[in-house]
Amino acid sequence: MEVLVGFGGRVPLSRRESKKRYFNIRAHRASFKVEEENDDPFFQAAIQRASLRLRESHSPGNSILYTYAYPFLPLHITHFQHACALMDPLLVDPYVGCLLPSNSLEDMDQQLHPYCLATKFIDDKLLETMQSTDGLKQVVLLTDGLDTRPYRLNWPTSTLLFDICPEKVFRRAVKKLQAHEAYPNGTAVDDIEAGAKIPRGCMSFHVPSESFDIENILRSKGFSGTRPSIWAFQGLPVVNLASFKDILSLASNLAMKGCLFLGELPGWMAETEVGDQSATLKWLDDLFMSYGFRVKIIEYDEVARNLGKNSAKRASGVGTSILFVAEHLRFSDDQMETWRTEFQRIEEEGDEEGFEEL
């Protein structure tokens, strides 16, 4: 029997209508054949991150809390509202279900995970920066191939999305996403088109992370170093510090002065002892500054507090990754080339005028 993945696990499709008002995702059966990828640790990590987004999307919401808290509302409305804030999902990914096996919600821990805090922070920072920065229409996403940001975020019109991720994982994900069906409340199955879509007026370009010359591939697909951009790193496989330095070099060469580079680094990358915050900050500052970036570490607890979450009890394991925002302080290669060309033109015009006077 075909099933619907919803609150509390799997239920028969005959009960779908009663579940629609709580959640509007129809997860397909048997998506990726995970067992075929057991030898690929990067793919397994991508599956784990996607599972965390699915779990957070299905976390209990106000409707369930209301059922149990209603008798006490007159006396405890403030506590009820605080509890609702604690239990509302940080994010809703309406497409991630089709990328995972249909039993992905079974036996899942309901504690808030730091990855979900980081994902919410990056989502919000991307959209807020785009809304507040004139001319910012270029977004570079460095991902694991299962990231759904191009589809699930409300990008401004004319946004160009450049998704740098593993080719094999991306191709599999695209096939599943194109066949995915999302059902808004009150919409019959036969009344909606299938397939995840990029927001109207935007364009998305895939760049294989295995490519030899990513910089020129980005340029060939329309990226311009003379226009503002924002870069987000979350999930892209890196095998060592040298791999991440290549990414920093890429961003430094292409991003205009003032552009932001944000994301989440694996904790093992830091060449410091675990828990030594000051040493980690110095290491990170030296690393980013060597490529022209001024970096700031973002505390997971701070993100949780800003979102009304009790991070001290729920965001366990925050030391395993580093959340950061960095501002580029150098001019891009394209900016430098433009100014060199203009300076040369001015010099040549000056020489010609001086020759005419003689």
Image (cartoon, helix red, strand yellow):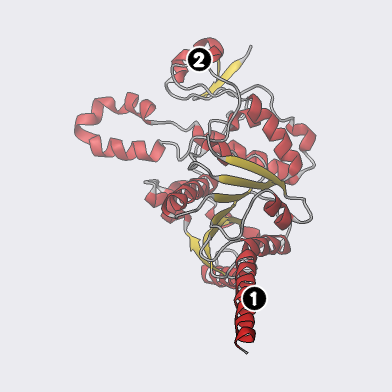
Left or right position of 102 against 171: left
Residue in front for this viewpoint, 165 or 297:
165
**What numbered label is drawn on residue 344?**
1
Amino acid residing under circle 1: Gln
Q: At 68% from the left edge and 34% from the top edge, which residue is drawn? A: 173
Residue in front for this viewpoint, 136 or 86:
136
- Circle 2 SS class: helix
Q: At 47% from the left edge and 47% from the top edge, which residue is drawn? A: 127
Amino acid residing under circle 2: Arg
Left or right position of 292 against 75: right
Label whose residue precedes the other's in the sequence (1 or 2): 2
Quick one: which residue is furthest to the bottom in this view? 358
State the image coordinates of residue 58 (x, y, percent, origin top left).
50, 31
Say which quadrant the C terminus sits in.
Answer: bottom right
Quote the CA–CA distance across marks 1 and 2: 68 Å
State the image coordinates of residue 294 (x, y, percent, origin top left).
53, 69
| Circle 2 residue | 16
State the image coordinates of residue 257 (x, y, percent, origin top left).
54, 66
